[in-house]
Image (cartoon, rainbow, N blue to C red):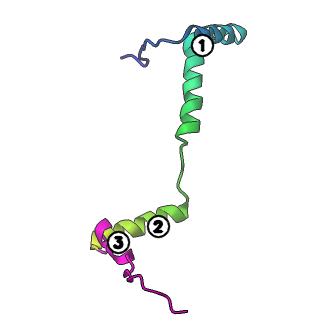
Amino acid sequence: MKNRRTMTISLPPAMAEQVEKVRKAEHRTRSELVREALRTYFTARVPEVTPSARELAAIRRGRTEIHRGDYLTIDELRQALETPRRKAGRQKA
């Protein structure tokens, strides 16, 4: 069973030259360089978040409430948040 998957990508010539310069300077393969670049990108773009004990407790409470049927649908929430509209009238001076 393979633990790697081969992918083919295309780069603009200037970017390909940068990859070559960096990999030679750091004595690495293209694959190592691209893997590290992707790890850095994924970490910055989609950070892994570990919920706190307090957040986990809130999630459990919320799931319990949902299981009991104690929740509002989005339409019910919108309706509850609507304020009665007043007719615009003239202000007395």
Q: Quadrant of the C terminus?
A: bottom right
Residue that extends furthest to the front in the rendered view of this protein: 93
In the figure, residue 67 lies in which quadrant? bottom left
Q: Residue at x 42, y 85 (%)?
A: 89
User: Which span of residues is magenta-colored?
Assistant: 70-93
Residue that label 3 marks: 77
Q: Residue at x 57, y 11 (%)?
A: 30
Considering only vertical position in the picture, is 93 above or below 42?
Answer: below
Q: Earlier in the sequence, mark 2 or mark 3?
A: 2
The label on residue 58 is 2
Label 3, residues with CA under 10 Å away: few <14, some 14-19, many ≥20: few
Q: Amino acid at mark 3?
A: Leu
Q: Earlier in the sequence, mark 1 or mark 2?
A: 1
The residue nearer to you, when weighing 75 against 52, is: 75
In the figure, residue 78 lies in which quadrant? bottom left
Looking at the image, residue 19 sits to the left or right of residue 63; the answer is right
Return the x and y of residue 92 as percentages of the image width and height.
51, 92
The label on residue 15 is 1
Q: Amino acid at mark 1?
A: Met
Mark 2 vs mark 3, CA separation in Å:
20 Å
